[in-house]
Image (spheres, grey):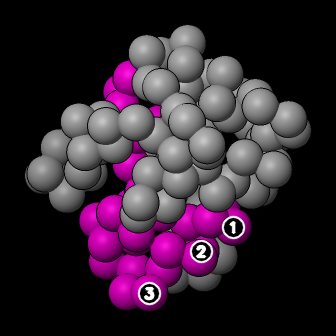
Amino acid sequence: MDKINAFDAIYQVVREIPSGRVTTYGAIAAYLGMKGGARMVGWAMNASHTLADIPAHRVVNRNGVLTGKNFFGGNRMEMLLAEEGIRVQDDQIIHFKQHFWDPSAELA
């Protein structure tokens, strides 16, 4: 899968993440069969900020940390999550497992 097609596949999954839920770079990569593809998912999220329909704020690292927040500018990622009822403290989602959305289970 080339980079453009990989990004399109990633964006399709990210569009499915429900409001108030989050997933991880690795969970998306695993669902798409991209072994070791978590970085590719991160690159896609970083490149998605010009696309209004990609809720990139719902993608975090495997520990629920807002590792992509710098690409949103300031506290925008945290604010977007808060609007959906997800609380964050010190850049980490509180009760991460409660909010976790697994594409392999949800989109199967």
Asked whether residue 31 is drawn in magenta, I would say yes
Give the image location of residue 41, x and y in percent. 56, 66
- Residue in front for this viewpoint, 51 or 38: 38
Pointer 1 with pointer 2, Cβ within 8 A: yes
- Give the residue pinned by disc 2: 40
Relative horizontal placement of residue 60, taking residue 105 as reference (left or right): right
Give the image location of residue 67, x and y in percent. 64, 57
- Per the model, the C-alpha gap separating discs 1 and 2 is 5 Å
Pointer 2 with pointer 3, Cβ within 8 A: no
Q: Is residue 100 above or below residue 82?
A: below
Dot 3 or dot 1: first in sequence order is: 3
Give the image location of residue 74, x and y in percent. 85, 35
- Residue in front for this viewpoint, 53 or 64: 64
The secondary element bearing badge 3 is classed as loop
**Residue at the extreme right of the image, as rendered:** 73
The secondary element bearing badge 1 is classed as helix
Residue at (87, 38) in percent of width and height = 73
Pointer 3 with pointer 1, Cβ within 8 A: no
The secondary element bearing badge 2 is classed as helix
**What span is colored magenta in the figure?**
15-44
Q: Is residue 53 above or below residue 101?
A: above
Amino acid on which the number 2 mark rests in the picture:
Met
The image quarter containing residue 47 is bottom right
- Give the residue pinned by disc 1: 43
- Give the residue pinned by disc 3: 36
